[in-house]
Image: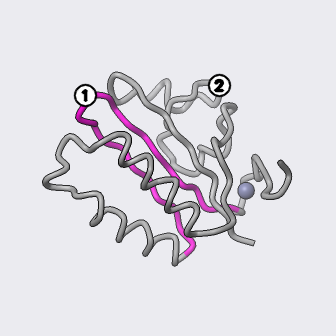
Amino acid sequence: MTHWHAYAWTGPERPADRERVDPANPAPPLEIADWLRKQVGPEATFGDRERAAAWLRAQGEEHRHLSHGAFPLDERMEYVHEALGLGTDVVWGYYSTAKRYVSRSLIACPREHYACPAPPGAG
Ligand SMILES: [Zn+2]
């Protein structure tokens, strides 16, 4: 059954590619599905779309987009609901008003060639 793994990473700037491709490094990967192979593991797992969206919205409220005028959270959330409704991923990567690089992702699972890092209901 489709579920989403929630991943969060915040740093001073967008990380270098060599950090991103390293599964041992918690920096956001280049290929979004490779989140599932990161050793850090997901912050949360959601079987419910609304709960997944609520998690992301809370992240967006805590870490305001540097260009929130151009990218209002309500509009970004419309895309989030659309993507989750289609059973696909949501990936956010932006600079916050605190001048931090904020990476927040909801990765749809299961998917081919990837093992589920945290099956829903397993904890
Ligand atoms: Zn999974």
Q: Is mark 2 within 8 Å of ligand 1?
A: no
Give above or below for 122 relative to 12.
below
Foreground: 109 or 51?
51
Q: Which mark is residue 67?
A: none
Magenta range is: 87-109
The quarter of the image holding the N terminus is bottom right
Magenta highlight on residue 42: no
Looking at the image, is mark 2 or mark 1 nearer the viewer? 1
Where residue 50 appears, x then y in whole percent?
55, 69
The three-letter amino acid code for the residue at tag 1 is Lys
The three-letter amino acid code for the residue at tag 2 is Ala
Helix, strand or loop at disc 1?
A: loop
Outermost right residue: 122
What residue is drawn where x is 56% and y is 60%? Answer: 52
Magenta highlight on residue 106: yes
What residue is drawn where x is 69% and y is 65%? Answer: 47
* 2 or 1: tag closer to the N-terminus: 2
Assign ligand 1 to one image quadrant.
bottom right
Outermost left residue: 69
Helix, strand or loop at disc 2?
A: loop
Where residue 27 appears, x then y in whole percent?
50, 30
**Disc 2 + disc 1, Cβ < 8 Å:** no
Which residue carries the number 1 mark? 99
Which residue carries the number 2 mark? 24
Give above or below for 115 relative to 84.
above
